[in-house]
Image (tube, helix red, strand yellow):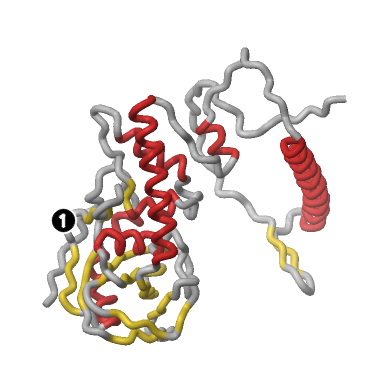
Amino acid sequence: MIKTKVAVGKLTNDVTMSCSRLAGLLGLNIKYSTPNEELQKSIDALAPGYIRPVKINDAIHFGNVTETLNLEYAARKLKLFDLSTGLSEPVKHKSLPLQGSLDGIANTKSQLIVSDKEKGIYCIGKDGNIVDSMYIEGLGVLEAKLTGVYPSDKPDPARGPIQIQGLMMCTGYSWGAVSVLYQGTKHIVYVYESDPSIQSVIKNEVIEFENKLHVFQEEGVVDWYNIFSPNEGALVYANSEEDLPSIPLDKDDEDLVEQLQAAKAAISAATKLKDEATKKLMDKLAIHQVGVGKNYKITWGMTKGRKGYTVNDSPPARAKSIKVEEIL
């Protein structure tokens, strides 16, 4: 029996950690979100009168409207029954502050799922690699994804695998599947078993996250995670005090300074080499757009140009780099 409905969107609140945010919390999705940004999201959601930001783009729209079709196709591939989509209630872990929104659930009698590249079915083992087959039985979690990236035998950890483990923790189900539609035409289903090792990491990270929220609620200060990038450093340590005394640097710190200086020197040298080669090739091409040799083809085209715009004033902000001066 099929009970499919359209996607209803995020059902969880923005304070408690949710399964869709776990990849960011574990530092596996830093292109889009870091542990500190996930912490800031929950802190923001604690404010009186908080309104969840609404994000709408093409990927989100088409992900929502194709979600049911995506999961129905996955259910047929895996020979599942009693597929339910458009679920209207979040799932919550029985003891951890962890919640999730289910895209779908489905049932199966005990069956052996076999990895089949032609059919777009891959069983993913506990080491993250493809295994030949996997037994699944009973209810399982289904997660739908839509992406414009090139199809892959193994999905990005941030595109479902971590989320599906969190959802299995919340439901108690023993298996789950991430159903990915690549570039609108290639459909692959990745099947996972419940993985105690990954779930142990998730448990520990969720507990630490909740402790940091409690610190903020009780003391009004943020116990930040270690930063993941210089850009994030400018966000976490947004303000500095000019009147504070300097702090001493130990041997390890000065080793890092030397590493920073060496990296800058290497970048500078590489930039000079790049610029020297580029200008000579520009002289070679002159007014031509394309040059072709035995091993390479080079192109020096035209930009599309852009309309003028006005940039608003911005307040002072913490620099995103560190200035180094050698002490003689």
- x, y (%) of residue 160? 38, 63
Residue farthest toward the right in the current orientation of the protein: 328
In the image, residue 60 lies at what x, y percent? 32, 54
* Near-viewer residue (114 or 58): 114
Q: Is residue 190 visible?
A: yes
Q: Is residue 60 above or below residue 79?
A: above
Q: Amino acid at mark 1?
A: Ser
Q: Residue furthest front?
A: 95
Q: Is residue 152 visible?
A: no
Q: Is residue 167 above or below residue 36?
A: below
Q: How many marks?
A: 1
User: Which residue sits at x=18%, y=79%?
Assistant: 81
Residue plotted at (23% across, 28% down): 49
| Residue lying at 77% horizontally and 57% vertically, measured from the top left | 285
Please identify the residue farthest to the top as the structure is shown.
243
Q: In this figure, which residue is indicated by the disc labeled 1?
A: 88
| Quarter assignment of residue 162 | bottom left
* Residue 264 in which image quadrant: top right
**Up-down relation of residue 148 to residue 37 (above or below):** below
- Check the picture and name the quadrant holding the N terminus: bottom left
Q: Which quadrant of the rendered structure holds the C terminus?
A: top right
Left or right: where does residue 110 sit relative to residue 2? Answer: right
Q: Position of residue 269 (x, y in %)?
A: 82, 46
Label 1, secondary structure: give it.
loop
Residue 256 image offset from top left, x and y in percent: 73, 40
Residue at the (37%, 84%) spot, across then down: 119
Q: Mark 1 Cα within 10 Å, few/some/many (few <14, many 20+)?
A: some
